[in-house]
Amino acid sequence: MRVSHAGVLAAAVLLGGGGLGLYAGFSPHASVPPVDASAANRGPATPAPEAPLTTATITYRAPARPEQPKPAAFPVPPAPSQPLAYAPAEPLPGVIDAAAQPRRAIQIKSAAGPRGLVILQIGDSHTAADFFTGEVRRRLQSIYGVGGTGPVTAGRPHVGVLSASLKSTMSPGWTYQSLQKSDDAREFWLSGFNAVATAPRETMTLTAPQPVTFDSIEIEAVSRPGGGSIDISLDGAVESSFDLASEKVEPIVIRLRPQRGPTDRVSKIVITTKGEGSVSISSVAIYNSRSGVTLSSIGYPGATVGIVNKLDERLFADDLRRINPHIVVLAFGTNEASKPKFDARRYAGDYQRVVAKIKAALPSAVVVLVGPPDGAELPPQCKDKAREAAVCLRAGEPKPKPSPASAANADQPSAECVWKSLPHLESVRDVQRDIAQRQSLVYWNWASIMPSECGADRWATLSPPLMAKDRVHFTIDGYKKSAAQFLTVLIPIIEKLRASPDVVSNN
């Protein structure tokens, strides 16, 4: 692995994802020799149980900015008379407004000292779109302060993968690899996607809506034989060049730290490919470990909880330890509930394995299980006008009588076109609830905030609607309402963490 410089840089190659390594300092005008991690660390031949992960750390000098006061952990937001960076929206009727909670500075204690609150949510399309988690993030940050972005999936690998923290724009030459469609998990970090470019001058731009104070930026990538190289620019200035060529395929982490310490801010990160060779980028993360709330959302459209078990265990554990969340939220169940055949025992085993992996990497983290919301489906023959006219029947209501037109035209309403709840929703919730009870985890039933009968259909027919026409996903208003209610679960956990005298770091 080689690290070249741009501007005033000091480079370090760390083996083991954060341990001590060889440091090589460079002047701004000297030629930068290759830094060979394997040769530099060659010593007595001691066999290792497995190959260590590789992290390259690059420290740069940002343009001079006025010195800012050192932020306190979980800073108090401005008084209501002052503008907030993330101004709370008007609360929906009947929804508890988390922004109305008492505004006060809090500290999450650990052996390493107080730090900002970190939450990681892993889930399906409800999480991937970042509408639900984005509103949770916005409301929490309006109370406790803005942290970093945490990891954001590189690029736009799927129409349902979005981020409210960093907007991604890409040049046309990028393609995508997906863990869900791959038989080899060894090239995938937690994001589950790789953005791949093979030509020079392809760009990936990530832009924050507001400048983000940070103490490190991490880019998860994959090096390989014949790998290309990249320039990394922050707010228009090229801060580093990195070569992704290596002797074997190897997931790596490129870490940038501000030389002055955690007082710098960044608004735009641009990754530009150089020369020929394959470049694979998995995620980009901005970390502010000292203060505020960082809520990372990692979602896989169409996935079940089994996708987490498909991740490489070593890479998954490394991701968890670097993100180091106080709270991990698992939000799966909709896709499991829609499967024609559902094996509750097998599902329980899959889910418990995921929880066990999280607890092994993060023994002090609070794990929250989110049960699936209500969702409904129609028979496949119900299309177009018949779909629009379909209804959901509550207990005791008769089926609509078929009309002569419906028998002659499949587009017309028919007695068979009735919205019905996804077949295994209750079984999925029972499994999740049982795991939470037996392992002393937190459980929240998303469906509890919806009508008990025909919940998805009734929310879809409100004005404005809270459910999308597919009766599976929510509208923006529906996700906002759901997020506000979820905070009634999260905020007590946060306050308990703040008050605990014996909280320790996961690292």
Image (tube, helix red, strand yellow):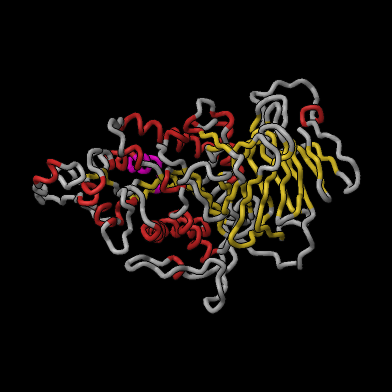
Residue 53 position, x and y percent, is 66, 33
Is 60 covered by the magenta stretch? no
Residue 466 position, x and y percent, is 33, 58
How many numbered circles are shown? 0
The span shown in magenta is 432-442
Q: Is residue 376 left or right of residue 19?
A: left
Residue at 64% from the left image edge and 61% from the top image edge: 211
Residue at 34% from the left image edge and 37% from the top image edge: 336
Is 437 covered by the magenta stretch? yes
Residue 155 sits in which quadrant? Answer: top right
Residue 480 sits in which quadrant? Answer: bottom left
The answer to whether residue 370 is seen in the rendering is: yes
Q: In the orientation shown, which residue stands out farthest toward the right? A: 30
The front one of 136 and 31 is: 31
Q: Is residue 450 left or right of residue 320?
A: left
Residue 195 position, x and y percent, is 59, 39
Q: In the orientation shown, which residue stands out farthest toward the bottom? A: 81
Q: Quadrant of the C terminus?
A: top right
Residue at 50% from the left image edge and 39% from the top image edge: 359
The front one of 155 and 303 is: 155
The front one of 166 and 85 is: 166
**Overall secondary structure of the magenta stretch?**
helix
